[in-house]
Amino acid sequence: MQHAVRPRTLLRPGPVPAPRPRTRRVRSLIDADALRVLHRAARVLLDDLPQLTDRLVAVLQEQEPVYRAAVEEDPTATWQEVHRSLRHSISSLLDPRGARDAARRCSWKIGATRAEQGMPLDALLHAFRLGGSLVWQGLVDETSRTAPEDVRLLVHVASDVWDFVDEHCTLVADAYRQTERQLAWRRENRVRLLAAALLDGTSRIADLPEAAQALDLPEQGRYVVVAVGGGRPTGCPGAQAVLGPGVRVHWHTGVEADYGIVLAEDGEEVVVPEEQPPGVRVGISGEVEGLAAVGEARRLADTALGLSPETGGTVRLTDHLPAALVVSSPELGAALVDRLLGPLEHLEPADAEVLLDTLATWLACDGSAQRASRRLYCHRNTVLNRLRRYEQLSGRSLSRPSDLVEVSLALTARSLLSR
């Protein structure tokens, strides 16, 4: 019996089946085989972890001088650190999810600890990469020994191994830099506190050696304090602007003024330009002996700063001692003004101002009526008449030294306390 053959033109085309994902299936099978090879070798490395640790410590000693010193200083601590890091690394190859957090914590702690110890970051990262290379070489060697035909499969997991190494190098670097920033802040804060205590006069004797080291200044030496107010420049550039280059000084930023603790060279005066930028006011203390006396020098510098004009300039306390006495005791200065200049209050303000201006000019001219008259654009006799009028109103004699001293101080107090 013959079967009828249907013409091809009568066949109805059915749906075209989707192509089977042969490449993906083959890839997944390869990956699964590669993971089995990886896990088999990793378990052997984990069992031989002490020997692997010894090898890595030896490599570090050979290739990284910093670790050579670390091993010599504390071999047990270094060995245990390497052992922990390798254990977490290999465990992460066997169980990425389960071991991930513990491995990250381990690397972070190593980065933070080594930053505290001052180990260079480059050396630490080099150590982690050497550890990664040693683990990878161990995986290849173990697979070559037990199943050489499977070595080719390790290529498919190589990126996973090196991605792990890169991730943990980043972790170590982040931990190191964060700890380094924290340590720097603590150091800076400690220096600031030590300098503030010196300037406040509250520093303990026991803290002086630490303060000397932190500020890079000798505990015993001659010091002056420079107080800078107004448009005060701070930091090294500001220090050079106020003091000039080559001065050994530590700057401390205060609330109302900045302070420079300046080491005075033997037999030499601290040189500070008289002219300062507009608005920059500078007061310089007298010299004191040793860091323990810096607090007293700061008080003297504040006094000198109080004498500096608002427009800017430099005042050295030792050149203005009478004025310093006045501003050091504003209450006594005000009493002196009231006693010596109060009798002029009943005059017309303009008349009183003329007498006071004449007194001040005459004193500035060292008691010369002739020179004072030239400055005041008046006749010499006019100057003398005004001086006699003051004597009559105040009951003081400008030819008596004690009265002259009091008048001079009263004029200084009036000028300073009216600011």
Image (tube, rainbow, N blue to C red):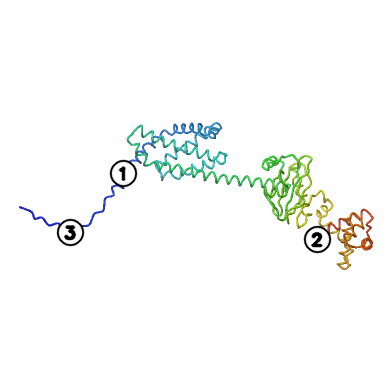
41 and 260: which is toward the camera:
260
Q: Is residue 341 left or right of residue 228?
A: right
CA gap, disc 1 and disc 2? 93 Å
Q: Name the residue under label 3.
A: 12
Left or right side of 273 for 356: right
Q: Is residue 103 above or below residue 396?
A: above
> Between 45 and 400, which is closer to the camera in this rendering?
400
Q: Badge 2: few (under 14), some or many (20 or more) residues near its Cα, within 10 Å?
A: few
Q: Distance between the residues labelled 1 and 3?
A: 38 Å
Label 1 element class: helix
- Of the residues under marks 3 and 2, which one precedes in the sequence? 3
Tell me which label, 1 or 3, sits earlier in the chain.
3
Based on the displayed image, in which of its 4 quarters is residue 220 positioned?
A: top right
Q: Residue 107, position in %: x, y?
A: 49, 42
Q: Most extreme residue toward the left, as rendered?
A: 1
Residue at (65%, 45%) from the top-left corner?
190
- The residue wearing badge 2 is 418
What amino acid is labelled 2 in the image? Ser
Disc number lying in front (3 or 2) = 3
Q: What residue type is labelled 1?
A: Leu
Q: Quadrant of residue 280?
A: bottom right
